[in-house]
Image (cartoon, rainbow, N blue to C red):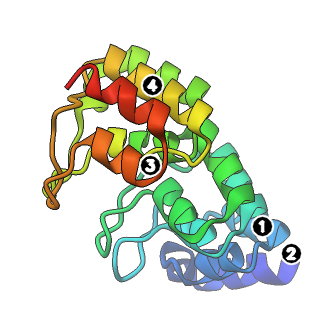
Amino acid sequence: RDAAAAMARAHPEWLARPTALHAAARADDVDAVALLLDLGASLEAEGERGGRALHVAALHGAAGAAALLLARGAGADPVERAWRATPLGIAVWHGHTRTIAALAPASRDVWGLSITGHVERLRTVLAEEPARARVALASGWTPLMWLPDDEARALEVVELLLAHGADAGARNERGETAAEVAERRGMEVVAARLRAVE
Protein backbone atom coordinates (compact mmCIF):
# COMPACT_ATOMS: atom_id res chain seq x y z
CA ARG A 1 0.00 0.00 0.00
CA ASP A 2 2.79 2.42 0.90
CA ALA A 3 4.68 1.64 -2.29
CA ALA A 4 1.53 2.10 -4.38
CA ALA A 5 0.78 5.41 -2.68
CA ALA A 6 4.31 6.59 -3.40
CA MET A 7 3.97 5.63 -7.05
CA ALA A 8 0.62 7.42 -7.27
CA ARG A 9 2.16 10.59 -5.82
CA ALA A 10 5.04 10.41 -8.27
CA HIS A 11 2.82 9.64 -11.27
CA PRO A 12 -0.72 10.94 -10.67
CA GLU A 13 -1.42 10.53 -14.39
CA TRP A 14 -1.37 6.76 -13.89
CA LEU A 15 -4.53 6.94 -11.78
CA ALA A 16 -6.31 8.97 -14.45
CA ARG A 17 -5.78 6.16 -16.96
CA PRO A 18 -8.05 3.11 -16.86
CA THR A 19 -5.26 0.53 -17.18
CA ALA A 20 -4.64 -0.46 -13.55
CA LEU A 21 -8.24 -0.34 -12.36
CA HIS A 22 -9.46 -2.28 -15.39
CA ALA A 23 -6.78 -4.93 -14.83
CA ALA A 24 -7.80 -5.31 -11.19
CA ALA A 25 -11.48 -5.54 -12.16
CA ARG A 26 -10.69 -8.12 -14.86
CA ALA A 27 -8.92 -10.29 -12.29
CA ASP A 28 -11.74 -9.82 -9.75
CA ASP A 29 -9.05 -8.63 -7.33
CA VAL A 30 -11.28 -6.79 -4.87
CA ASP A 31 -8.37 -5.69 -2.66
CA ALA A 32 -6.55 -4.16 -5.62
CA VAL A 33 -9.71 -2.42 -6.84
CA ALA A 34 -10.25 -0.96 -3.35
CA LEU A 35 -6.63 0.18 -3.08
CA LEU A 36 -6.70 1.89 -6.47
CA LEU A 37 -9.94 3.66 -5.63
CA ASP A 38 -8.53 4.73 -2.27
CA LEU A 39 -5.56 6.21 -4.12
CA GLY A 40 -7.85 8.19 -6.41
CA ALA A 41 -8.32 6.03 -9.50
CA SER A 42 -11.30 7.18 -11.53
CA LEU A 43 -14.35 4.92 -11.49
CA GLU A 44 -15.47 6.43 -14.78
CA ALA A 45 -12.18 6.29 -16.71
CA GLU A 46 -12.92 4.79 -20.12
CA GLY A 47 -10.92 2.39 -22.23
CA GLU A 48 -10.48 2.67 -25.98
CA ARG A 49 -14.08 1.75 -26.76
CA GLY A 50 -15.72 3.58 -23.91
CA GLY A 51 -15.79 0.66 -21.50
CA ARG A 52 -15.43 1.44 -17.81
CA ALA A 53 -14.20 -0.77 -14.99
CA LEU A 54 -17.75 -2.04 -14.43
CA HIS A 55 -17.95 -3.18 -18.08
CA VAL A 56 -14.65 -5.02 -17.62
CA ALA A 57 -15.91 -6.73 -14.47
CA ALA A 58 -19.11 -7.72 -16.28
CA LEU A 59 -17.22 -9.12 -19.26
CA HIS A 60 -14.98 -11.28 -17.11
CA GLY A 61 -17.58 -12.46 -14.59
CA ALA A 62 -15.89 -10.54 -11.79
CA ALA A 63 -18.84 -10.39 -9.39
CA GLY A 64 -16.82 -9.20 -6.38
CA ALA A 65 -15.23 -6.35 -8.29
CA ALA A 66 -18.60 -5.39 -9.78
CA ALA A 67 -20.22 -5.25 -6.34
CA LEU A 68 -17.38 -3.14 -4.94
CA LEU A 69 -17.39 -0.72 -7.89
CA LEU A 70 -21.13 -0.16 -7.44
CA ALA A 71 -20.72 0.28 -3.69
CA ARG A 72 -18.03 2.88 -4.30
CA GLY A 73 -20.26 4.89 -6.62
CA ALA A 74 -19.80 3.55 -10.15
CA GLY A 75 -22.68 4.37 -12.47
CA ALA A 76 -24.70 1.19 -12.97
CA ASP A 77 -25.62 1.62 -16.63
CA PRO A 78 -22.94 3.40 -18.66
CA VAL A 79 -23.09 2.40 -22.34
CA GLU A 80 -19.85 1.50 -24.08
CA ARG A 81 -19.31 2.29 -27.77
CA ALA A 82 -18.46 -1.09 -29.32
CA TRP A 83 -21.80 -2.83 -28.73
CA ARG A 84 -23.82 -0.03 -27.09
CA ALA A 85 -24.08 -2.29 -24.05
CA THR A 86 -24.49 -1.68 -20.34
CA PRO A 87 -22.51 -3.77 -17.83
CA LEU A 88 -25.65 -5.83 -17.16
CA GLY A 89 -26.11 -6.40 -20.89
CA ILE A 90 -22.54 -7.65 -21.18
CA ALA A 91 -22.90 -9.97 -18.18
CA VAL A 92 -26.14 -11.36 -19.64
CA TRP A 93 -24.57 -11.95 -23.05
CA HIS A 94 -21.74 -13.93 -21.45
CA GLY A 95 -23.96 -15.79 -18.99
CA HIS A 96 -22.15 -14.64 -15.85
CA THR A 97 -24.93 -15.36 -13.36
CA ARG A 98 -23.10 -14.18 -10.21
CA THR A 99 -22.20 -10.91 -11.88
CA ILE A 100 -25.77 -10.49 -13.15
CA ALA A 101 -26.95 -10.93 -9.56
CA ALA A 102 -24.54 -8.19 -8.44
CA LEU A 103 -25.51 -5.76 -11.19
CA ALA A 104 -29.28 -6.22 -11.54
CA PRO A 105 -30.37 -4.59 -8.25
CA ALA A 106 -28.75 -1.30 -9.33
CA SER A 107 -29.50 -1.43 -13.06
CA ARG A 108 -32.25 0.32 -14.99
CA ASP A 109 -31.49 -1.68 -18.16
CA VAL A 110 -34.94 -3.00 -19.08
CA TRP A 111 -33.48 -5.42 -21.63
CA GLY A 112 -31.18 -7.06 -19.09
CA LEU A 113 -33.79 -7.08 -16.35
CA SER A 114 -36.40 -8.58 -18.68
CA ILE A 115 -34.32 -11.45 -20.03
CA THR A 116 -33.00 -12.37 -16.59
CA GLY A 117 -36.45 -12.23 -15.02
CA HIS A 118 -35.61 -9.67 -12.33
CA VAL A 119 -39.28 -8.87 -11.89
CA GLU A 120 -39.10 -6.82 -8.68
CA ARG A 121 -36.35 -4.57 -9.98
CA LEU A 122 -38.18 -4.23 -13.29
CA ARG A 123 -41.35 -3.28 -11.41
CA THR A 124 -39.48 -0.51 -9.59
CA VAL A 125 -37.84 0.82 -12.74
CA LEU A 126 -41.08 0.86 -14.75
CA ALA A 127 -43.03 2.49 -11.93
CA GLU A 128 -40.53 5.35 -12.03
CA GLU A 129 -40.04 5.44 -15.81
CA PRO A 130 -42.94 3.78 -17.67
CA ALA A 131 -41.53 4.81 -21.06
CA ARG A 132 -38.78 2.23 -20.64
CA ALA A 133 -41.38 -0.47 -21.35
CA ARG A 134 -41.70 0.91 -24.88
CA VAL A 135 -38.05 0.88 -25.92
CA ALA A 136 -37.16 -0.82 -29.20
CA LEU A 137 -34.06 -1.46 -31.23
CA ALA A 138 -33.70 -0.24 -34.80
CA SER A 139 -34.20 -3.89 -35.78
CA GLY A 140 -37.66 -3.81 -34.20
CA TRP A 141 -36.84 -6.05 -31.23
CA THR A 142 -38.54 -5.07 -27.99
CA PRO A 143 -38.20 -6.34 -24.40
CA LEU A 144 -41.40 -8.37 -25.00
CA MET A 145 -39.28 -10.47 -27.35
CA TRP A 146 -36.43 -10.69 -24.85
CA LEU A 147 -37.78 -12.91 -22.08
CA PRO A 148 -36.33 -15.42 -19.61
CA ASP A 149 -36.55 -19.15 -20.38
CA ASP A 150 -38.75 -19.83 -17.34
CA GLU A 151 -42.25 -19.35 -18.72
CA ALA A 152 -43.88 -18.37 -15.44
CA ARG A 153 -41.26 -15.68 -14.91
CA ALA A 154 -41.54 -14.65 -18.57
CA LEU A 155 -45.28 -14.17 -18.13
CA GLU A 156 -44.67 -11.91 -15.12
CA VAL A 157 -42.29 -9.80 -17.23
CA VAL A 158 -44.84 -9.64 -20.06
CA GLU A 159 -47.61 -8.47 -17.71
CA LEU A 160 -45.38 -5.74 -16.30
CA LEU A 161 -44.30 -4.51 -19.74
CA LEU A 162 -47.86 -4.54 -21.08
CA ALA A 163 -49.15 -2.67 -18.03
CA HIS A 164 -46.69 0.09 -18.85
CA GLY A 165 -47.57 0.40 -22.51
CA ALA A 166 -45.36 -2.10 -24.36
CA ASP A 167 -46.55 -2.77 -27.92
CA ALA A 168 -47.33 -6.44 -28.45
CA GLY A 169 -47.95 -5.82 -32.15
CA ALA A 170 -44.43 -4.57 -32.94
CA ARG A 171 -42.44 -6.69 -35.39
CA ASN A 172 -38.74 -7.41 -35.51
CA GLU A 173 -36.59 -7.51 -38.64
CA ARG A 174 -37.78 -11.09 -39.28
CA GLY A 175 -41.37 -9.88 -39.32
CA GLU A 176 -42.14 -11.64 -36.04
CA THR A 177 -44.32 -10.30 -33.28
CA ALA A 178 -43.48 -10.98 -29.63
CA ALA A 179 -46.13 -13.73 -29.65
CA GLU A 180 -44.43 -15.44 -32.58
CA VAL A 181 -41.04 -15.21 -30.89
CA ALA A 182 -42.53 -16.75 -27.73
CA GLU A 183 -44.22 -19.48 -29.76
CA ARG A 184 -40.96 -20.31 -31.53
CA ARG A 185 -39.38 -20.71 -28.08
CA GLY A 186 -42.13 -23.10 -26.97
CA MET A 187 -43.83 -20.61 -24.63
CA GLU A 188 -47.45 -21.27 -25.52
CA VAL A 189 -48.98 -19.51 -22.50
CA VAL A 190 -46.91 -16.39 -23.09
CA ALA A 191 -47.71 -16.47 -26.79
CA ALA A 192 -51.44 -16.71 -26.09
CA ARG A 193 -51.29 -13.77 -23.70
CA LEU A 194 -49.47 -11.64 -26.23
CA ARG A 195 -51.81 -12.58 -29.07
CA ALA A 196 -54.75 -11.44 -26.95
CA VAL A 197 -53.44 -7.86 -26.99
CA GLU A 198 -51.85 -7.58 -30.44
Q: Which comes sooner in the sequence, label 3 or label 1?
A: 1
The type of residue carrying mark 1 is Leu
Which type of secondary structure does the marked residue at label 3 adopt? loop
Foreground residue among 146 and 94: 146
**SS for callout 4:** helix
Q: Position of residue 19 (x, y in %)?
A: 55, 84
Label 4, on which residue?
Answer: 125
Residue 85 x/y as whole percent: 38, 62
Give the residue pinned by disc 3: 77
Question: Which label's residue is closer to the chain start, 2 or 3?
Answer: 2
Cα separation between marks 1 and 4: 33 Å
Which numbered circle lies on residue 1?
2
Q: Considering only order in the chain, which callout, 2 or 4, is on the residue closer to the N terminus? A: 2
Q: Nearer the viewer, residue 165 or 100?
A: 165
Quarter occupied by residue 153: top right
> Is there a contact, CB below 8 Å, between mark 4 and mark 3?
no
Q: Nearer the viewer, mark 4 or mark 3?
A: 4
Mark 2–mark 3 distance (CA, rounded to whole Å): 31 Å
34 sits left or right of 131 in the view: right
x 65%, y 82%: residue? 23
Q: Residue at x 60, y 43 (%)?
A: 104
198 horizontally vs 6: left or right: left
Q: Name the mark nearer the viewer: 2 or 3.
A: 3
